[in-house]
Image (spheres, helix red, strand yellow):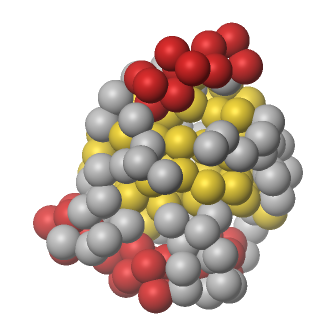
Amino acid sequence: MTIVTADLYDEFGEQLRVASPVFGDFGGRDAFGGPIATVKVFEDNSLVRSALQEAGAGRVLVIDGGGSLRCALVGDLLAKLALDNGWAGIVVHGCVRDSVAIARLDIGVKALATNPRKSVKRGEGQRDVPVHFAEVDFMPGEYVYADLDGLVISERALD
């Protein structure tokens, strides 16, 4: 499926939730989508790593980092791990680092900004819980579709 969010909106309209346009594009893949898996953390990417170590099976990891701009939750090593394990993309309500290297990887990555600072590693946070940011809810098992125009969320897969 070729993902064009404007076309998806034209076809499915009010069935979709449209995220506020707050994300930059950092990955080497401009368009991506799949079932949502979530992680809710704050300045600690331990659970991000553990999620990305699992088989992605075409899913998109949606990371609610509380919008913190003080450190990165994803760098090139985690983006490469995601790619190697079959994740379609990563959406970060927070920062990434190693943006030049991430741009060379064939994976979709959206985030608020970049920051060279690493996160802490305390193992804190939650997995597979509903998260809310960019004026929309991201529910595990629903679907997110992204391209350079933005993000749309659907309760079901769109063909």
Taking the view exactly as shown, the residue that stands out farthest to the left is 100
Quadrant housing the C terminus: top right
| Residue 142 visible | yes
User: With respect to residue 93, does 108 lie above or below?
Assistant: below
| Residue 121 visible | no
Please state which of residues 58 and 100 is positioned toward the viewer in this rendering.
58
Quarter assignment of residue 35: bottom right
Please state which of residues 31 and 7 is positioned toward the viewer in this rendering.
7
At a point 60% along the width and 69% down the height, the residue shown is 58
Quarter assignment of residue 76: bottom left
At a point 71% along the width and 45% down the height, the residue shown is 157
User: With respect to residue 72, does 8 lie above or below?
Assistant: above
At a point 44% along the width and 79% down the height, the residue shown is 83
At a point 65% along the width and 41% down the height, the residue shown is 158
Residue 70's spot in the image, x, y percent?
A: 40, 49
Residue 41's spot in the image, x, y percent?
A: 67, 56
Residue 109's spot in the image, x, y percent?
A: 39, 56
Residue 120's spot in the image, x, y percent?
A: 53, 71
